[in-house]
């Protein structure tokens, strides 16, 4: 599915960004109800086995023993002591996971994770872009939420509507998309990384000249000139769960969570490298098909076709004080009790109006109200106008019905 152009009129609904964003990092820990939280950026979602094991050790020895894959293919550690930042930073530096103290929060790069698919070597792009970002003093002014997406031509990560998207083409070219624009700029593939970096710099300079402050390109699309070509229609096909056509494995994690022991099983199955995905899963290039049963036994999702497909949820209680419900527990009960077969539309459970971690595009929005949930459609005409208020007991049936919507 191709990404959707921004439906907002230019300049409409620009949030107040007078303050700096509070996005957590590996060094700037975020206080949560269940302890401090650290977010470790992984450009392209890539981890060596050694790095993956270092994260498992940090989660077990410094935190609550769990690791969480985010909607950008990064890793979060929770339940940390508020004074463990120095030790955590030292561990991450030793593992090669913290190449720049000053730029660590702006290393937000997702890349198509397929092991042998697509048109371009987007992981080489990701490495080069990361090096260029960390070498650019001005880049520290980017928000910790500003996102680069590097798509191999399949359209999988282009559908995330990142701030700057590069799409590999079949003829040695690339397409540069800014925000949710319906147009693109063609650039030579060899210059694609520089074009992406220049676009981010151009965004900052245009903000300064206009006297505005925004975290995302979609908030001020009129600041940058549109591309000369229409955005192409892309398949939008994600790597399937299980054995990949080009070799390797792809497994999913329920709500992106894994205990340290489960995470070590994942690392043990990898052949040198893991690629964490923005769909809260992991691609293991080169891993043999024989490891799939072991991963399934460890609790990983290894096949599609269930209600868990496209399901996500924010942290909720008890980890977040703003949440009105333990949304992950409620969501898990609803998903486990759903009828057999594919779930339909993506669905996201939120504990409050912030809707942290929600996916882009069409989805079912399930919002805790304190008395139950509000179930609505997002990204479809008149979606929220058809919202229904339900009790906890009614929520599962309402979600299942909404996911079957074909509007």
Image (tube, rainbow, N blue to C red):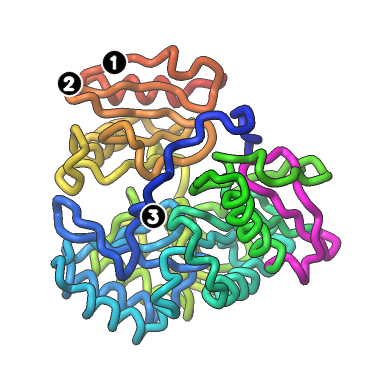
Residue located at (54% from left, 22% from top): 380
Give the spatial CA distance, label 1 vs label 2. 9 Å
Q: Residue 402 magenta-drawn?
A: no
Residue located at (66% from left, 48% from top): 178
Question: Which quadrant of the structure image shows residue 166?
Answer: bottom right
Q: Residue furthest right?
A: 171
Q: Is residue 196 left or right of residue 188?
A: left
Check if mark 3's residue and mark 1's residue have beta carbons within 8 Å.
no
Q: Please, what secondary structure does the residue beneath circle 1 have?
A: strand
Question: Residue 152's x, y, as percent?
Answer: 68, 59
Q: What residue is shown with label 1?
A: 389
Indicate the quadrant containing the N terminus: top left, top right, bottom left or bottom right.
Answer: top right
Q: What is the total number of numbered labels drawn onto the structure image?
A: 3
Indicate the quadrant containing the C terminus: top left, top right, bottom left or bottom right.
Answer: top right
Residue located at (59% from left, 40% from top): 220
Check if mark 1's residue and mark 2's residue have beta carbons within 8 Å.
yes
**Frontmost residue, 6 versus 115:** 6
Question: Residue 191's x, y, as percent?
Answer: 76, 69
Which region of the structure is painted magenta?
Answer: 170-193
> Dot 2 surroundings within 10 Å: few (below 14), some, or many (20 or more)?
few
> Dot 3 surroundings within 10 Å: few (below 14), some, or many (20 or more)?
many
In the picture, the disc for residue 371 is 2
**Frontmost residue, 227 versus 160:** 227
Give the spatial CA distance, label 3 vs label 1. 28 Å
Task: Note whether residue 156 is visible.
Answer: no
Q: What residue is shown with label 3?
A: 70
Q: Is residue 125 left or right of residue 389?
A: right
Task: Note whether residue 3 is visible.
Answer: yes
**Frontmost residue, 314 versus 219:** 219
């Amino acid at each position: 599915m191709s990404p959707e152009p921004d439906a907002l009129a230019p300049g409409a609904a620009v949030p107040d960004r007078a303050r700096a964003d509070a996005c957590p990092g590996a060094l700037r820990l975020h206080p949560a109800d269940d302890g401090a939280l650290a977010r470790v950026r992984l450009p392209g979602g890539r981890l060596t086995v050694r790095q993956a094991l270092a994260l498992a050790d940090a989660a077990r020895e410094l935190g609550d023993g769990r690791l969480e894959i985010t909607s950008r293919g990064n890793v979060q550690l929770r339940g940390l002591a508020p004074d463990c930042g120095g030790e955590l930073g030292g561990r991450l530096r030793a593992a090669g996971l913290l190449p720049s103290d000053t730029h660590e929060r702006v290393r937000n790069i997702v890349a198509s994770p397929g092991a042998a698919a697509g048109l371009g070597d987007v992981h080489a792009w990701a490495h080069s872009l990361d090096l260029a970002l960390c070498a650019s003093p001005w880049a520290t002014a980017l928000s910790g939420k500003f996102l680069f997406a590097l798509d191999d031509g399949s359209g999988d990560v282009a559908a995330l509507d990142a701030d700057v998207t590069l799409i590999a083409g079949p003829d040695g070219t690339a397409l540069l998309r800014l925000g949710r624009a319906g147009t693109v700029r063609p650039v030579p593939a060899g210059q694609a990384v520089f074009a992406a970096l220049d676009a981010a710099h151009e965004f900052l300079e245009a903000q300064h000249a206009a006297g505005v402050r925004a975290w995302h390109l979609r908030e001020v699309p009129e600041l940058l000139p549109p591309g000369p070509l229409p955005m192409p229609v892309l398949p939008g096909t994600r790597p399937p769960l299980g054995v990949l056509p080009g070799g390797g494995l792809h497994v999913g994690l329920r709500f992106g969570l894994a205990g340290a022991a489960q995470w070590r099983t994942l690392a043990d199955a990898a052949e040198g490298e893991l690629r964490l995905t923005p769909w809260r899963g992991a691609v293991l290039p080169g891993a043999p098909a024989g490891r799939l049963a072991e991963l399934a036994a460890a609790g990983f999702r290894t096949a599609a076709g269930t209600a868990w497909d496209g399901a996500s949820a924010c942290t909720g209680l008890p980890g977040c004080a703003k949440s009105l419900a333990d949304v992950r527990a409620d969501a898990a009960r609803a998903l486990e009790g759903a009828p057999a077969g594919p779930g339909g539309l993506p669905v996201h459970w939120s504990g409050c109006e912030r809707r942290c971690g929600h996916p882009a595009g069409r989805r079912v929005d399930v919002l805790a109200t304190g008395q139950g949930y509000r179930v609505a459609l997002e990204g479809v005409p008149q979606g929220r106008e058809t919202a229904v208020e339900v009790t906890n007991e009614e929520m599962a049936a309402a979600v299942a019905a909404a996911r079957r919507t074909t509007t």
